[in-house]
Amino acid sequence: MGDAFSPEQRRWLEGFASGAAAVRVIPPPNKDAGPSGPEAAHFKAQDRTVAAGKKLVDQEKWKRTENPFEAYNRLKKEALAGTKPKPDDNFRWRYHGLFYVAPAQDSYMCRLRIPNGILKQWQFAGIADIAERLGGGFTHVTTRANLQIREIKPENGPAVVEDLTDIGIVSRGSGADNIRNVTGTATAGIDPHELLDTRPHARAWHHHILNTREMYGLPRKFNVAFDGGGAIATLEDTNDIGFQAVIVPDGTADRAGTSLEPGVWYRLALGGITGHQDFARDTGVILKPTEAIRVADAIVRVFIDHGDRTNRNKARLKYVLDAWGFDKFLGEVETVLGHPLTRVDASLLPPRPGYDRLAHIGVHPQRQTGLNWIGVVLQTGRLSCDQMRALADISHTLGDGDIRLTVWQNLLVSGVPDDKIAEAKRRIEAIGLDWQTTPIRAGLIACTGNRGCKFAASDTKGHALAIADHCEPRVTLDQPVNIHVTGCHNSCAQHYIGDIGLIGAKVTINDEGDQVEGYHLHVGGGYGTDAAIAQLLYSEVKADEVPARVEGLLKAYLGHRAHADEGFAAFARRHDADQLRTLAAEALA
């Protein structure tokens, strides 16, 4: 019998048969397979927590109920209607960089992502335009070399996020349980003393985060910093991960006896969170700079699996390390990586180059002959939009076009030729800023305070300036003393690492229980090679009495330091609390 089907019919039947066969081999969905997709690791960690009889904190439930990135259209609709967010939506909005700061203000704050703290001048000017049009007309430079736009009306929140994107600035994941802005050496690529240019690594980590969905929704926030050994401290040891540039000399061998390639490597430090009184500790691991992103990714994945999702106060990397020890944790990291990490005895590596505690202020020669960076002094990090646009123009016409933010709440204009320094100084002064300051203001750091943060107990920025105003005409210092003023135990101003560190408190002033703003005052903190947690000296000092207390300490320091080069922290550590209080009182008598 002849062929009963035409060519077209045969092709249709072949396709049908092929499809039917494919259907037969596809297994039915396995309802017991567990979570899948980019949030799978997080959900599995939550499930293990619940299976162990523990209770998830609300934030963990909110993440699972509605993913913040998938809620954007609803959140945008509600914001445009002027709706104030409920606690769960306030948490979700932070994934987009927006923080509702009520009851301090009926407004949003927007936090950005600026890898290594470096912006192009046109971006800096663009942020000023956005802050002026949609915010309060100013920005704050933060202790993560970042910018905040404040006093954003609820209905303007989405416009801020979207307008920032238009100028190449991202706020995605800059708040909530995510990896925060990536910091690096402020003078990366221009510092004559640096060991390594951190910009490529900070940028690579920035883009890795943005393009890896698993990097969001961690047990709690996570900080990473890259220190290239420059003159300005990066404070990488206050981060969950600190990559510290080190020289590996020729002939160095690892602990297994394998010879290592000489050159610049990163030393790995883990677990910094000075608000919880701990610095990142050396792990004994070194790695080539090209390996940093893979290693950081593996560390975060171990934290995702094992970080605490039941207690927000313990949900940081430090507490996993405390519970496990470094060997067990690094073993898990090696399992994720699929290969061992390189371990070297710290004694075989030369120490990090020293810091210059005034390198973020004033004029300093770059590694490029004939060029300089100029550190601009800000009043506790605040900049008006007009000042931002003027600085952008100075950078454009007199510098290399970069604006470099620092963890010391100020900024650098880089690439200024020798013959344009005088003009740059004049133009900086003309906009109400300066390129020089006193040793008190050079290290004066303050968080937002209760003017714009619901957690703060005191007006930190106002009181920090009051300290400087009071002390400068009364005390003449010949070296910087860092004074850190923070409003709450989140310690955004890192009060524990200050020579003098203050944390906001409510002070009871009578038997009726009336309270006023005040502080607990600590002394003797430090960072880097001088790392130490400041110790409590005075409790519950009324805010209006703080400037005189600081004056007494500074005068006691000048009158009783061991030698002219002794810093305040070393002086404070040589005396116990009773001795310091006595010396300070005598200095004011």
Image (tube, rainbow, N blue to C red):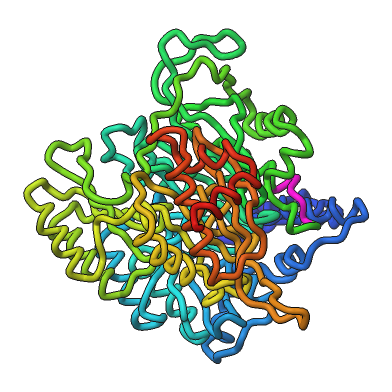
Q: Which residue reaches farthest front?
A: 589
Q: Residue 240 placed where, x, y %?
A: 60, 44
As drawn, is 115 to the left or to the right of 437? right
Foreground: 352 or 559? 559
The residue furthest right is: 53
| Vertical relation: 130 (above or below) 242 | below
| Region of the chain picked out in magenta, as a range | 304-309
Residue 493 is at least partly visible in this image: yes
- Where is residue 349 shown, x and y percent of the image? 48, 19
Which image quadrant for residue 216? bottom right
Residue at (66% x, 33% y) in the render: 333
What percent of the width, then of the height, locates residue 4? Answer: 66, 58
- Asked whether 17 or 202 is in front, the reply is 202
Q: Is residue 21 left or right of residue 476?
A: right
When the figure is inspected, residue 211 is found, relative to residue 133, above or below; the finding is above
Indicate the position of residue 446 as horizontal and vertical percent values: 48, 62
Looking at the image, is 17 positioned above or below residue 66?
above
Outermost residue, bottom side: 81
Q: Is residue 518 left or right of residue 200?
A: right
Residue beneath the point at 34% across and 63% down: 378
- The residue at 33%/41% (across/down) is 188
Q: Quadrant of residue 490?
A: bottom right
Q: Is residue 15 visible?
A: no
Q: Does 75 appear above or below 295?
A: below
Q: Is residue 523 magenta?
A: no
Number of marks in picture: 0
Give whichever of 556, 89 is nearer the camera: 556
